[in-house]
Amino acid sequence: MVALVIALPVAIFAVLMLIGKFMDDPQAEQRWVESETIKICWKQIAKPEAERKTQEFQSQEDCDRLELAFKQKYNENP
């Protein structure tokens, strides 16, 4: 009886983990990363150049290019 009380939740957890593994969408994760990169770009460009922590994004054209690539790849706005 004790073994059943312990084994049942463990088995349910294992099944849920397997379902989650199979439902994992790597493209969804990549879409999120690219969307966040665009948000960071716009935030960084909005700051005065002296206050920017990195120089990864130099101008508005960089952000526009990222948005265009996102729209072409996923057919949606970031």
Image (tube, rainbow, N blue to C red):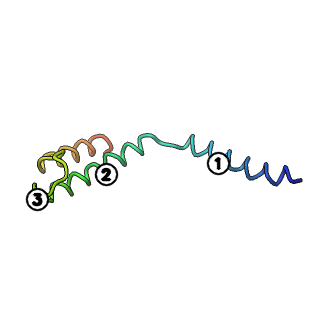
Q: Secondary structure at mark 2?
A: helix
Q: Amino acid at mark 1?
A: Leu
Q: CA distance from mark 1 to mark 3?
A: 48 Å
- Give neighbour class at mark 2: few <14, some 14-19, many 20+ (Cα, 10 Å): few
Q: Secondary structure at mark 3?
A: loop
Q: Nearer the viewer, residue 78 or 29?
A: 29
Question: Where residue 8 appears, x then y in whole percent?
Answer: 78, 51
Q: Amino acid at mark 3?
A: Pro
Q: Is residue 28 above or below residue 42?
A: above
**Disc nearer the start of the sequence (3/2):** 2
Q: CA distance from mark 3 to mark 2?
A: 20 Å
Q: Which residue is mark 2?
A: 36
Q: Secondary structure at mark 1?
A: helix
Question: Residue 16: which numbered mark, if any?
Answer: 1
Question: Where residue 36 appears, x then y in whole percent?
Answer: 31, 51
Give the residue drawn at x 11%, y 49%: 59
Which of label 1 and label 3 is nearer to you? 3
Question: Residue 48: which numbered mark, if any?
Answer: 3
**Disc nearer the start of the sequence (1/3):** 1
Give the residue drawn at x 57%, y 40%: 22
